[in-house]
Amino acid sequence: MKKIIIIGAGPGGYEVAIEAAKKGLDVTLIDKDELGGTCLNYGCIPTKTLYRSAELIKSSNNSEQFGVKSSIDFDFTQAMENKDSIVDNLKKGIEFLINKNEIRYIKGEATFIDKKSLKVNDEVISGDYFLIATGSTVKMLEIDGIDSKYVVTSKEMLSLKKLPKSLTVIGGGVVGVELASIYNQFGTEVTILEYQKNLLGFIEEDISKRLKPILKKQGINVVTSAEVTKVDKDTVYYNLKGSELKVESELILMSCGRKSYIDNLGISEIGIEFENKGINVNENYQTNLEHIYAVGDVLGETMLAHTATFQSYKALAHMLGEENSTNFSMFPACVFTFPEIATIGLTKKQAKELFETIEIKKAVYAANGKANAMGASEGFVQLVINDGFIVGASILGYSASTIIHEIAIIIESGKRLVEFKDMIFAHPTLSEVLALAIRE
């Protein structure tokens, strides 16, 4: 029986561990932290649980339009306890599957001692295949005062015992805008300081430009083109158009991205090639040592839980000589602000750089009956077309994280968009915004 050793028990590790065991491999899963990784314990799941609390508050605050008058009685402690309970239940579910599939799980830090074995908790373990899925860690700005006791990361923000009265978020990326949106609804006074001219600068410009006024309308103070220079206790100093300004707050969230985590792994000692961004791999997620694979955040590229999972499935298929046709150029990504944001494929700018001609189809939520009935008429669906095929899409609006998968199915079908123009969409639904865009 072939043996696979998986280092990292996040989505890129535990899910493929279960799959590998089902396919008859002897599986050992190792992690120095918690089962489920950052996503389950300090990221995706706790954030979205708190997002639901924030969503209910936002809905209640806007309820008078629908003739519902009520006051909000928000219990932060109970919201955090609910988050912990959900995380614990999901972790128990993973533990059950690990045990059911007879996977050996070791909690400890793994270090390669040669190309075929590693050491964990004073035990040497050898294997036929290795999969590195050690994830990432928070990037910290190299500025004076960053070690202030007032500075926290997303991990601490998701385990607070007391709701802060004020919060300064350094960085307007996904984690920054999501936590800013959540805590703003909780009643915290929030300021975002972003170095770039737009928030979420990597997504479709039509959305990144609109996000700032949307968040400001919700009561979040958003400062873009702000260069943070230092932190002095509870005060963040920054340059804006040549002027030095400052903002004081009860907490300061450092949210300037993440970096691949390879500390103490010993990969350089055994000759695995890597760069500053992360470990180098080929299209099958093999390192330069063909029996050692790497997936997920540790590659320093697309840092999403679901891409890590599907990369690990691709790696496992290659180990077993099986086919895997996952299209990694078309992965959906979602941002949970109010309203939601979702993207897939190329932005309009990227498409223009690749193709001679493109077509843009767009439909707005304001023209949708269900959106208006819900009081959720802000937003749009945009499709980027080349030669009749969707090559990219962006959504700003309610339930964007669901609708983006309808677009993904169209893309995966391999059919031109015109073949869907006569498809029937139920009325009244938010999906009809996509129908309008298709027919536009």
Image (spheres, rainbow, N blue to C red):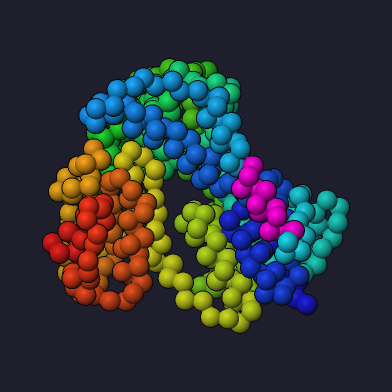
State left or right for residue 107 relative to residue 413: right
* Residue 100 at least partly seen: yes
Q: Is 92 left, or right, of 421 in this rendering?
A: right
Q: Residue at x 51, y 76 (%)?
A: 324
**In the rendered view, would you say 5 is above or below 70?**
below
Q: Quadrant of the C terminus?
A: bottom left
Q: x and y percent of residue 310 in the render?
A: 52, 65
Q: Nearer the viewer, residue 102 or 36?
A: 102
User: In the rendered image of this protein, does residue 159 appear above or below residue 395?
Assistant: above
Which picture quadrant has residue 11?
Answer: bottom right
Q: What residue range appears in magenta?
A: 88-99
Residue 95, placed above or below residue 161: below
- Residue located farthest toward the front when viewing the structure as drawn: 67
Please give the name of the residue rendered at 80% of the width and 67% of the height, measured from the top-left corner: 126
Residue 393, image x, y percentages: 28, 59
Quadrant containing the N terminus is bottom right
What secondary structure is the stretch in magenta mostly built from? Answer: helix
Left or right position of 233 against 106: left
Q: Is residue 379 left or right of residue 399?
A: left
